[in-house]
Structure formats: structure tokens, C-alpha cells
Image: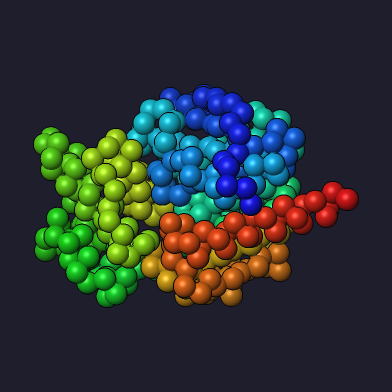
Amino acid sequence: MSSHLPTFIRRDWLDVGDGHVLHLAQYGNPDGIPLLFLHGGPGGGCVVEDLRLFDRDTFHIFLLDQRGSGRSKPHGELKHNDLLHLLSDIERVRLWLNIPAWCVVGGSFGATLGFIYSCLYPQRVLSQVLWGLFIPNEEGANWLYGNQGAATLFPQDYLEFTALAPFTSKIDALFKRYRAGFLDPDADTRMEYVRGWLKWELALALPGAELPESGTPLAKSLAEIELHYASQQYFGAYALMREMACGIKAKTVILQGEMDWVCPSVIIEKFLAKFGSEEIKYTLIKGGYHALANDKMFLEVVYAVQEMANNMREIDK
């Protein structure tokens, strides 16, 4: 794989209605295999480092910032920002680009979004690579935010996370306290809650890593959008995954880190055992974490994406 990032082609801001304008950047080979990258979060936005996953000459890469995320406008907007709108936006972008079908690559909540999109629009997905797939059911939410899941593995980090919501044992109450904190009139207090939210997530995604600058608008919008989706039970994502997984037609590779404490493998394995299909290939990555800052996961995703490209070339012969 080349050490050079794919060449920038163009960028656009697409008006998808409801006051939302999405940022879409294109990179790579204009005649290459069309590939949509779906960022996580929800609310994470795309960054140039995401391009390191892709060969510059093989793919025509589309980096789409979801509603309220990245460079999309209005930044951090929660109104009309829900799962069905995100899914509709993906298909609207595909139609605008006049692409019959494309490959999909995504991690964490981006993997969840890609999984559901491939269920709803099976003829529009050629192949996909997903990692750190989040199963947005009650078990997944309880694992992340309750006191009997990841909290038992990272008790000190969880104590710090919940210290901003003292005497709270229920997830709904925890969310309510954080929502109030994000809206506090004092800027320092707001940032304290943003740091608390993101620090807990990082403790699970890449244990031992230091929290980067959290006083930025991007950090604040990420925390707010994540809370927005979590407090709405991810807007029915699990029901769609459960009911429509059998509709996936594209070859689907799912990579899950053995040490992914955001989306633990036991939850996805139970899901796939019950609702998986022959089109889905699942691999547990030994020593892999949730974040691609972990070299093990990064290299495994790069390899899977390259294998996807090789398979696409074989089909075209």
C-alpha cells in the first residue's frame, strides 16, 4: 500500500433539506472503484487520516460528513438528526453522484449505519468492510453506560464518568445530567461535561491513551450527537438490524477486536448467531481494540479493504 494519501478530487456541500447541508469530499482515482466511507460516533465526522485505509489508485473515495458532523452544516445540529435521515442522506448522495452501486467501509456506529443501509438497499452495495460494529440494543447500551458492563473492567474511569452525575444509578438519569451539563450557561462547566463524556469513551476505545484537545467545537458536537442518539435508543437501529439482516446481498466482512470494550465481541457474536447470513464473514482480531489508532486493527482493516478490491477486480474480469 502506498504511503501517500489519495489525491483530492473535489468537495461539495449538498442541501438535503430540513436545514441540513452535508459536506462530501472526493479523493483517489475518479475511474476507480466507488467507495463510501462512513465515520463513527455518531457525530465523529471524517478526517484526512481515514484515507490511510485506501489505496490511492484503486478507489474513488467518498468521505461523507453526516448531519451535524465534521464540516456539515449547521454544526452540531440535533433537529432532524436521526437514524432514518442519515440512511436517507446516503441514498440521496448516491443518486446525486449518479453511481449505480458502491462499496461501503465504516467503523463503530458507521459500521452500524453501513450494515443497515446494505439491508435497506441491497442492490446498491457491491461489497463492504465493517469493523467495531456496534449493536444498538439494550444490552449494548447497558454495557457502555450502565454500572454492570464496561464499568466493571474500568471502575476508576467509570467513577470519574459518573462523578458528574452523583447519586445516579439509572442510564436515563445519567443521560439527563449530561444533557443539562452540555447546556450549562457556564462555558467551563460545559467543557467539563464534554471532557467527561469523551474521556470515558476513549478509556474503552483505546485504554491508556490520553484525551486529545476536548475544548473544540468538534469535540462538543461529537459528545452532544452521541448523547442525542444514545438517549433515543439509537432511533430504532436494532429493530432494523434484527428484522432485515437476512436481506444483505453484498459480501460483508466484519472485523471485531478481541479487546474492543466499546462494542464487545460477545454481543455481536450473539447477534450474528441469531440473525447472520452466509454473506457475512466475521473475524475476531486477536489483540485488536476498537480504535484504528491500534495498529493491529488498522492493518487488519487495510488488508480487508485490499482483499475487497481484489475480489471486485475478479468479478469485473
Colouring style: rainbow
Residue plotted at (47% across, 68% down): 288
Say above or below: 298 vs 69: below
* Residue closer to the observer: 263 or 122: 263
Q: Front-most of 192 and 9?
A: 9
Q: Residue at coordinates 48% horizontally, 62% vertically from top-left?
A: 295
- Dividing the picture into quarters, in which one does residue 301 lie? bottom right
Q: Quadrant of residue 280?
A: bottom right
On screen, residue 146 versus residue 115, left or right, reads left
- In the rendered image, is residue 172 in sight? no
Name the spot of residue 64 as percent of width and height, x first: 53, 37
Residue nearest the viewer, comparing 304 with 144 = 304
Q: Position of residue 197 (x, y in %)?
A: 26, 53
Q: Is residue 296 visible?
A: yes
Q: Is residue 220 left or right of residue 265?
A: left
In terms of image quadrants, where is residue 184?
A: top left
Q: List x then y, in percent, for residue 52.
A: 54, 47
Give the residue drawn at x 26%, y 44%: 213
78 in relation to 231, above or below: above
Residue at image coords 27%, 53%: 211
